[in-house]
């Protein structure tokens, strides 16, 4: 059975040595000293290793079942869920007014990476709840907040998001679910939603569904969509639960992965719903949940890569196969461990350099969310809005690829279910699809986010890179191995953006055909930036002579690998972009 260990040292390095979180002028950050974060991360790592990870394979093998209208979760899930809930982990960064601990979001992201690496399917239950909590917290009335949030923070009640219908996925303007106004101010919700993660289960007393539906007589298309709170059980005025609310599970989907999570077809048959936010403004409220979810999904892609990599390293050290071409390394054994072979090292270095760069990228993104939430900083809000499709799309694409590489290190044993490596690949696969498929993320990046504030946010990103390079120039080693490659890749990103501006106006397909490559080009630049920041921090610590010298030396070596072996992919992506739409659109439809 695969194992998992929380990367607390690396998380501490990024939070303190790279981002210097306690020194930032964000409310709550000054409390995050090393001892405090070490205690939080250490306990989260323990729970991940001892409580949640042992259930990962069990959830994969047993899956969920629908019995008499109720979804039954895998053995051990409820007990672990109770432990997570009792420890306050489900409300770590939630509002203290509703029972949360009020800690910064960055801690939720850091602990969430570990929890999800230990068991992605399990963590989707509290994860969806947090997103629903955020939407109600941002857009709900005082009465709605008082009624629903305390028990959602504690996960006595869990939450979902209901968007997709059988006839519409990304194009939500095609939805058919209806919300008919009632005399008491509520709405009668009728319709069917599909692919609803954590749609029902036996670990909480109630499930609070956030459901998109159309009020009759409203505007056509997406402009006529509203968002409603639809509890599984009616909540009485005194907070106790009443009757079942016309909400039922039509089916539990059989899936490629995340077997431990209930992906449901949800039927609403005259269910009582309560308008969340303004009528016909449902997407605005839902995007509060979706933007948070997209960063979370990006970290899921990372987390599966982390778990797979850790097990690949163990296997590569233990599996004996062949001899090192430069000389025998295991003279007392029949063969050398496969970790001596350059191609195995290549796969491990690909994984390690991606994981550590992606972790820093995700945590950096979370600091922008903290700043925007706590201070109302519009520039931070705009920057994380620009980077969200990159975080989601790039980290999940690459995260999936890294689970495949980890599986490859096991050879044929990686293809055998007994080893457990296939689960990481199967579970990671969904991250590229849900919360907006990655092609949609790329279109969002190029079609909407690149032009945010008239392009000022994209220019601010380029200025950020330029300022960093200028401020950290002068060290010959850092300049040659990090600053210069980062400059080159940033210029390629700017060239691609300029191509879209010049050619996309004449033919929008030129921009759309290159959008996916642009997302990956952007992702590599972001990881190049994070590796450059980590290199500067690691070298500074070595010069100080404090801390674990071996850790910092390893960090520099890993960073050099990314800059020399992974970052050059930006040139390939640029050339694809510059080729325009013609090679993509050349065939007629009947020629496929």
Image: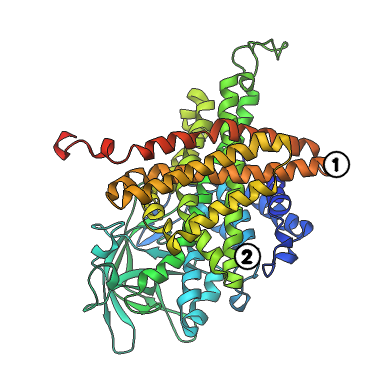
- Decide: few, some or many residues near mark 2? Use Cα within 10 Å; few <14, some 14-19, many ≥20: many
In the rendered structure, the answer to whether residue 270 lies left or right of residue 441 reads: left
Question: Is residue 569 shown to the viewer in this render?
Answer: yes
Residue drawn at x 49%, y 34% as measured from the top left? 569
Q: Is residue 157 above or below residue 416?
A: below
Q: Quadrant of residue 86?
A: bottom right
Q: Quadrant of residue 275?
A: bottom left
Residue 149 at x, y = what percent? Answer: 52, 75
Residue drawn at x 42%, y 48% as measured from the top left? 497
Residue 328 at x, y = what percent? Answer: 69, 10
Residue 121 at x, y = what percent? Answer: 49, 51
In the rendered structure, the answer to whether residue 482 lies left or right of residue 262 reads: right
**Quarter containing the N terminus:** top right
In the picture of the structure, the residue carrying the numbered disc 2 is 92
**Quarter containing the C terminus:** top left
Q: CA distance from mark 1 to mark 2?
A: 35 Å
In the picture of the structure, the residue carrying the numbered disc 1 is 545
User: Residue reaching furthest bottom?
Assistant: 183
């Amino acid at each position: 059975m695969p194992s998992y260990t929380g990367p607390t040292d690396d998380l501490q390095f990024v939070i303190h040595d790279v981002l210097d979180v306690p020194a930032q002028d964000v409310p709550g950050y000054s409390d995050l000293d090393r001892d405090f974060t070490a205690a939080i991360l250490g306990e989260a790592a323990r729970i991940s290793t001892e409580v949640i990870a042992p259930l990962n394979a069990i959830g994969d093998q047993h899956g969920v079942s629908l019995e008499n209208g109720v979804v039954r979760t895998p053995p051990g899930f409820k007990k672990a869920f109770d432990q997570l809930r009792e420890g306050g982990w489900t409300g770590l960064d939630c509002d203290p007014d509703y029972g949360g601990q009020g800690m910064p979001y960055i801690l939720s992201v850091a602990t969430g990476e570990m929890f999800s690496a230990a068991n992605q399917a399990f963590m989707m239950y509290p994860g969806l709840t947090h997103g629903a909590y955020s939407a109600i917290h941002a857009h709900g009335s005082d009465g709605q907040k008082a009624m629903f949030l305390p028990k959602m923070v504690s996960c006595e009640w869990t939450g979902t998001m209901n968007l997709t219908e059988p006839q519409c996925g990304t194009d939500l303007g095609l939805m058919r679910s209806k919300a008919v106004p009632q005399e008491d101010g509520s709405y009668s919700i009728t319709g069917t939603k599909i692919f609803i993660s954590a749609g029902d289960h036996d670990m909480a007393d109630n499930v609070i569904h956030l459901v998109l539906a159309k009020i009759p007589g409203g505007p056509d298309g997406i402009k006529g969509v509203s968002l409603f709170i639809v509890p599984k059980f009616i909540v009485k005025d005194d907070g106790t639960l009443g009757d079942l609310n016309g909400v039922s599970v039509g089916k539990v989907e059989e899936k490629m992965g995340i077997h431990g999570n209930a992906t449901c077809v949800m039927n609403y048959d005259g269910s009582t719903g309560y308008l969340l936010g303004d009528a016909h403004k449902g997407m605005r409220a839902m995007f509060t949940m979706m933007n948070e979810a997209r960063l979370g999904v990006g970290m899921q892609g990372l987390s599966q890569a982390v778990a797979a990599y850790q097990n690949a390293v163990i296997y590569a050290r233990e599996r004996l196969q062949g001899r090192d071409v430069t000389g025998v390394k295991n003279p007392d054994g029949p063969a050398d461990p496969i970790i001596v072979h350059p191609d195995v090292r290549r796969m491990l270095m690909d994984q390690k350099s991606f994981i550590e760069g992606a972790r820093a990228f995700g945590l950096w993104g979370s600091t922008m969310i903290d700043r925007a939430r706590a201070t109302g900083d519009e520039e931070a809000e705009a920057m994380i809005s620009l980077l969200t499709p990159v975080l989601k799309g790039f980290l999940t694409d690459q995260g999936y690829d890294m689970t495949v590489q980890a599986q490859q290190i096991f050879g044929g044993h990686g293809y055998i279910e007994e080893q457990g490596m296939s689960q990481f690949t199967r579970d990671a696969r969904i991250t590229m699809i849900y919360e907006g498929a990655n092609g949609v993320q790329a279109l969002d990046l190029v079609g909407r986010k690149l032009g945010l504030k008239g392009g000022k946010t994209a220019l601010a990103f380029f200025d950020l890179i330029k300022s960093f390079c200028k401020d950290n120039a002068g060290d010959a080693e850092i300049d040659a191995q990090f600053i210069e490659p980062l400059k080159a890749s940033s210029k390629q990103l700017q060239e691609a953006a300029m191509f879209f501006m010049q050619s996309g106006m004449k033919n929008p397909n030129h921009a759309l055909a290159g959008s996916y490559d642009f997302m990956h080009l952007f992702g590599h630049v972001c990881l190049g930036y994070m590796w450059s920041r980590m290199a500067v921090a690691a070298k500074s610590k070595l010069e100080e002579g404090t801390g674990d010298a071996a850790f910092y030396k390893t960090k520099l070596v890993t960073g050099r690998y990314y800059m020399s072996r992974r970052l050059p992919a930006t040139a390939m992506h640029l050339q694809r972009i510059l080729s325009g739409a013609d090679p993509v659109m050349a065939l007629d439809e009947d020629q496929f």
